[in-house]
Amino acid sequence: MSDNKFVKKIACIGAGYVGGPTMTVIANFCPDYQVTVLDISQERIDQWNSNELPIFEPGLKERVLKARGQNLFFSTDIDRCIDEADIIFVAVNTPTKTFGEGAGKAVDLQYIEQTARRIKENSKSDKIIVEKSTIPVRAAETLGKILHSGNNSIHFEILSNPEFMAEGTGIHDMENPDRILIGSMDTPSGQAARDELIKIYERWVTPENLITTNLWSSELSKLVSNAFLAQRISSINSISGLCEVTEADVDEVARAVGKDSRIGPKFLRAGVGFGGSCFRKDILNLVYLCEHFGLQPVADFWGQVIIMNDYQMERFVQRMLKAMFNSVVDKKIALFGFAFKPDTGDTRDSPAIYISKMLLKERARLCITDPHALKNAQKDLEGVEGEIVYEPDPYKAAEGAHAIALMTEWDQYKTLDYKRIFESMEKPAFLFDGRNHLDHQALFDLGFNVHSIGKPDRIQFDDPS
Ligand SMILES: NC(=O)c1ccc[n+]([C@@H]2O[C@H](COP(=O)([O-])OP(=O)(O)OC[C@H]3O[C@@H](n4cnc5c(N)ncnc54)[C@H](O)[C@@H]3O)[C@@H](O)[C@H]2O)c1
């Protein structure tokens, strides 16, 4: 299939948060491979071909500019590129189903199926199909049935190669992965396809970090990884409520617990709750699978991780209300941060969305600030009733506000001039730190009433009675 200039041609269907950056990294490390990232959205492809990339990720732009037009291409010419490709990555979205059987839990596989049908219709030679999207265990079986249906002599070898990068550190994670996981069928053609994929990754990944498994283990490992990560956050968040009523400090508890090498320190930071496009969706998928296979106690166990996350967000708003004399009607609240985590503009399933909606229901006036996520915030809150202002400057956002609620631990929020901010606010001035990100004592000393997660409140006018 490949012309002389390139060893192999790679196509990736889906130019989103995963498809764009992963293919950019592959193109950078494999200049002898032609890499084309494809999407049905002309707007997205135009953005990838412009100077305003569709997503913000540290280090991404430089790497795109290095390879774009050399061996990295972004295109909507899906049919032709499928035909020409030797290896096709599938990185389309796999959201939670919102309708019919399994609504609210199961994965909506319509984009995966559309992609499989398009690959089948446009392929004139054998191909390796790589599942990059997160999908339910045994989805490769369905994919295989679609690809090999009808009178088709073409062979598609399906591999599972889930993506483990975290947004905000995506490029670093892809260039220095803890592991690259490749699942394949235990057949000669399965092993040959697996070796083709290894040839790409071994350019920059050491052999001990290249893990190979059977297809189903690989598919399931991605869901389980996300479930374990989210479970750690819900675990420490569950303890934060207990800390608040017992004068224990959740950060001290997390430090003491995490020092145990069997437990480890990572993902033990209490906060307002986890967000992002994956954790909730992947746990719901795991829960649905467990229910489907009659494993109800297992489904309930994992379902609790989400229940705890929702509870944490509700609890945060209830604490705000209680602190602000049980009413936020007509009070201006400045939301510092809207992205679900720092160093990304992604707001999908961000706790800030839930918190905003709850505060608007209580008739607060919101002023939202974020260095990279304001456009997405506007889309997320479109049509929601209430007063919402979007303000890139945090100082202006806080002007005249009764409270600041910190939603995202952007680095720049640490170094703001909080004295200036305090002076510009209504009094008493409240600060609710949803990420335990700021220096609470210093803020208290400036005059703020400070409420954080899993720590005693610092209140200026505490009534000793
Ligand atoms: N975002 C993450 O951090 C992350 C991390 C690991 C895994 N994943 C998984 O990777 C997958 C993709 O996630 P994402 O965040 O990149 O999603 P995304 O929504 O950012 O991107 C998906 C892209 O696929 C395109 N698309 C949908 N159907 C198509 C079709 N039939 N043909 C061509 N293009 C099509 C969409 O237009 C969109 O641009 C999901 O399964 C997700 O669970 C995401």
Image (tube, rainbow, N blue to C red):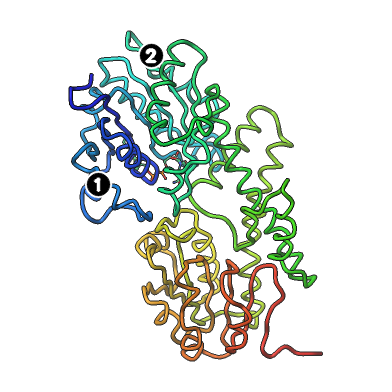
Amino acid on which disc 2 is placed: Ser
x and y percent of residue 14 in the render?
Answer: 34, 38
User: Are there few (<14), some (14-19), or many (20+) residues within 10 Å of tag 2?
Assistant: few
x and y percent of residue 150 in the render?
Answer: 35, 11
Asked if the residue at label 1 sits under 8 Å from ligand 1, the reply is: no
Amino acid on which disc 1 is placed: Lys
Number of numbered discs overlaid on the protein picture = 2
- Determine whether the residue tagged by mark 1 lies in a helix, strand or loop: helix
Quadrant field for ligand 1 = top left
Q: Nearer the viewer, residue 369 or 441?
A: 441
- Determine whether the residue tagged by mark 2 lies in a helix, strand or loop: loop
Residue pointed to by mark 1: 66
The residue under the point 59% across, 40% down is 225
Q: CA distance from mark 2 to mark 1?
A: 40 Å
Camera-near label (2 vs 1) is: 1
Question: Answer yes or no: do the residues labelled 2 and 1 have beta carbons within 8 Å?
Answer: no
In the picture, the quarter occupied by the N terminus is top left
x and y percent of residue 63 in the render?
Answer: 30, 48
Depicted 363 relative to depicted 278: above or below:
below
In the picture, the quarter occupied by the C terminus is bottom right
Depicted 25 relative to depicted 33: above or below:
below
* Left or right position of 285 against 148: right
User: Are there few (<14), some (14-19), or many (20+) residues within 10 Å of tag 1?
Assistant: some
